[in-house]
Structures are given as structure tokens and as C-alpha cells.
Image (tube, helix red, strand yellow):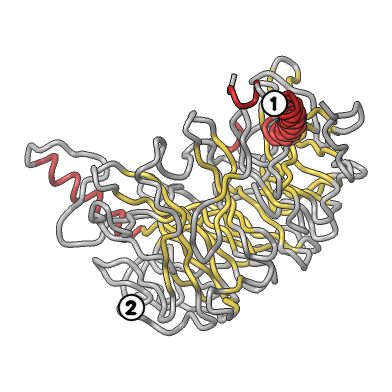
Amino acid sequence: MNNSLAKKPGAWRMGSRSVRRAGRWFVFHASFFMLHFSAASQLRDVSAPDTERQITTAAHDHVLTNINCWSPDGRWLAYDTRSEGGAKFDGSSIEMVDTQEGRVRVLHRSRDGAGCGVVTFHPVNASVVFILGPENPASDWNYGFSRRRGVLVDVHRPGRIRAMDAMNYAPPFTPGALRGGSHVHVYSPDGQWLSFTYDDEILSRLDEAGEKAKGQRGAPAVSGAMPMGHDRNQRNVAVAAPFGPVRVARSHPRNHDGGFFCAVVTRTVNAPRPGSDEISRAFEEGWLGENGYVRADGARQRRALAFQGLVTAADGSRHAEVFVVDIPDDITRPGDAPLEGAATRRPAPPAGTAQRRLTFTDARKFPGVAAAPRHWLRSSPDGARIAFLMRDDAGVTQLWTISPNGGAPRQVTRLPHGIASAFSWNRDGTRIAAVIDGSVCVIDAASGAAARLTPRREPGDAPLELACVFSPDGAQIACLRRVMSQETGYTQIFTVRVPAPIPPPPNL
């Protein structure tokens, strides 16, 4: 004990009161902290018996796309019928189901051996877009990443497909046409443009020839080896704008015209320099905002895409980082190389595109965007936040956001269980839907607090990672679960009711 206090009882009494006050202050603030921490780190269970409804029952798989699976009026869900939860591209039809009455309408039925899948709605009009594989496939021309295309169907005119992208598989190459496969077509929020990933058939054939030649010379034919003298086929992000139609020469039996003008908007290189911002792959993109985003200079960028770019770290390892590409209003003007590419060169981005790296995670314990679950970057409706998944230092996959103008990423969730699915924002940007610990959950985008809307289910019975998608009004979430039927499991569509408001966490 301090001697000066021992000599002054009054001072000691004052010190005791201070200690007591400090203790009460500590208990109060510790309780407040624990309440906040509990809300942000635990999954509150707000499920109810009638929260979840099974919408489909037919004895085949039903596969939702992870965005724009709802019709604009929020009544219908579009899906495809690929087997094994979409792992095989053998879909025989594109369908939509009435979530109120269970009626099913077939929008397209496969013919001439062309599988179909990955369907999304137009955000305003009653139409859908989906992937179509090659008609009359042959041993030298069957379904593959570089041999697929996008087609459109008006829901009031089922069965009448229209080509979205023109295809040009042999010279002369045509600006606005692609030379390979397009995948996961998603309309911009205004319904004018589409984004998708792209693989180049011309370069893919050169890659195969190079690997075969290496094998014949006695060297191992390593998958992904870099043949000399030409660009490699590497996945890129492309867009389609309503500047068509685009007509191509009939220099190849698989060439066809298309209704939209297409352009590759990302830039990849064969071998990124370690520690640089160069990428060898661009994928899992998403439109920024309902009306773009506000740049650091205060100007509005009307069209931009966030995407994952595969970088090479300084130590030679590879991982994905978050990138943005700003897209000009006119994508018909070539930049530093031809839009249509050349016999040994990939298509080049239009003049005015600007590709930027946003995250720099090489030094983290677990660098890069999480590879699993597979997910697409998604922007808040105002365009101010790009959401993505990344592991924390404990290895748990958490939700993060970053501004399209860069800066430090913000960790949104601090959950003991990793996020286990693709995710979606609601229309006002306050909530995010995802599968966590065997449940469909909602996350408060501001606090990171999460709540279970469905009871926890064991693996095999839990909601699948493929889709967890808010309805346009935010009142429901569409998801998938595997349901046993006559000793066979089929992927079925469920909807989950979202309470409004979600009950607050209990006081400690």
C-alpha cells in the first residue's frame, strides 16, 4: 500500500470509491463489448417452422444460378436440369417455376444434342439468357469451355432462341464476334449489357498442339504449359452491348451471327511477373452498383465490373486478388491491339478500359480471395462496397468488403463457422444471404451479425453452395437442397422467408 494513502484515511476512502467506479466501468463496458462481440460472432437462430418451403418436386435435378434467378416481379424462379447438381453439362431443359402455385413452364428443351444450363433473368423484361452447347456434337467438336455460347428466350415465346454472341472460329476475324465459349451471362442492372467469362477456341487449339508437340519430342506434356509464339487460352471477362447485330463470314461450319456486340475487357498475360499486378486469369465477375460507382475524383463511372484476377506472388505462388475494370460507353473502338484478336493473339480490350488491382494480400497468413466455396464478387447496390470471401488468420472463410476506389479491406463477419456458399445482397444493401454451418443465414452488412433462418442441417442435407439469392423485394431467399426420392437424391429448389425486422440478439 502507498504510505501516503495509509496516512490519509480520507484519501484511501476516495481511492476505494475510484476503484469501485473503475470496476463498474469495466464490467459495464466489458458486458457491452461481449454483447457486440456475441452479436457479430455467433449465429442467432430465428428460424420458424414455416420459414422454408420446397418449391420443386420432380424426379430430376434443379439448378439455380447464383444471381438473377428470380423474375423481375419476384414470382418465378428460373433453373436448369443439369445432373449432379450442375457438375455435368447435360441439361435437357431450361424451366421456370411459379413460387406461389408450383406451376412449371418449359422455356427451352434441348435438341440436336445441345445441352443447356446456367440461366438468368433479365432484370426488367420477361426474358432469360443461358448457355447452349454445340448442336450435333462430334468427336472433334463437343461441349467445352471454349465451345459454348449464350442464347436468349422470351418467356412468352418459349422454344424460340436468339443468339446473343456471334461466333467466328476461323479467319477473317470480326470485331464484335467471339472466337470461343461464353459462360454465366448476367445482365447489368439496367438490362442493357451483359457480362460473362470467355475462353478462346483458337488459342486453345494452339495450346493443345504445343503440348502434343512437347510430348512427341519426349518432354512431358504438362497441362497448362506455355507454348512459344502465341498467347495462351486463359479465361477472361467479356461484355456484350446492344450495338449489334454482328455478322461473320462463313469460314467455319460452326460460325454464326449474334445480336450483341461483344468485347473482352480484361487483360491477361502468359506468365505474370512475380510480385506484379499482371494476371493469368480473370473470372467470377460482378457488375458494380445499380448505376455504377462514384470514383475517387467524384465522377460517376457508369459501367464497371469487379472480378477475381489470378496473380503470381513474389515467392512464385499463385492466388486470386480483387480487381476492377472500368468500361467505356463505347466498346467498339480498339485500344492498343485488335478487338477481334489475331491467329496467335487473344482479343484485346477496347480503348478506354482501365484495369486496377484492389487487394494486396501476399503477406497474409492465408493470402488471396477464398477459392472455396466458389463465389462471384458482388457489389452493394450503391456501388460503394465489393463483397468477397477470404480466410481470416484462423483459416475461417469470412465475408469482407472493399471500396472500388481501393483502400484496406474491411472484415464484415467474425464467425466461428466459415461461409459455405455463393452469396447475394438485398436490394437496399443492408443484408447479405449465404449458407453458414448448414443453414441459410442473413448477415447484417454493417455489423456483421448473422442469423440462421433455417435449422442447422448435416452435410448431405444442408443447403448447397451453388446459390443463396435474395428475391427482388428482399422478402425471400432461393436456395437448393438435395432431397431423397425413391432412394435417389435430387437437387430441389426451396424458398426461405426473411423476417423483417430480424429480432435483435438477447441481452447477456
Q: How crowded is mark 2: few (under 14 residues within 10 Å), some or many (20 or more)?
A: some
Residue type, numbered disc 2: Pro
Residue kind at label 1, given as amino acid type:
Lys
Q: Quadrant of the N terminus?
A: top right
Residue 353 visible somewhere in the drawing: yes
Identify the image quadrant of residue 380: bottom right
**Disc 2 target residue:** 338
Residue farthest top in this picture: 487
Sequence-wise first label, 2 or 1: 1
Above or below, comparing residue 200 to residue 349 in the picture: above
> Does any portion of residue 43 appear in the rendered image?
no
Q: Looking at this view, is 383 or 212 the one in front?
A: 383
Residue named by callout 1: 8
- In the shown orientation, is residue 170 left or right of residue 25? left
Count of labels in the image? 2
Judged from the image, the secondary structure of the residue bearing numbered disc 1 is: loop
Would you identify the image quadrant in which residue 177 lies? bottom left
In-front residue for pair 152/50: 50
Spot occupied by residue 16 in the image (x, y as percentages of width and height) = 74, 25
At x 79%, y 24%, the residue is 455
236 is higher (above) or lower (below) than 313? below
Which residue is at the far front? 7
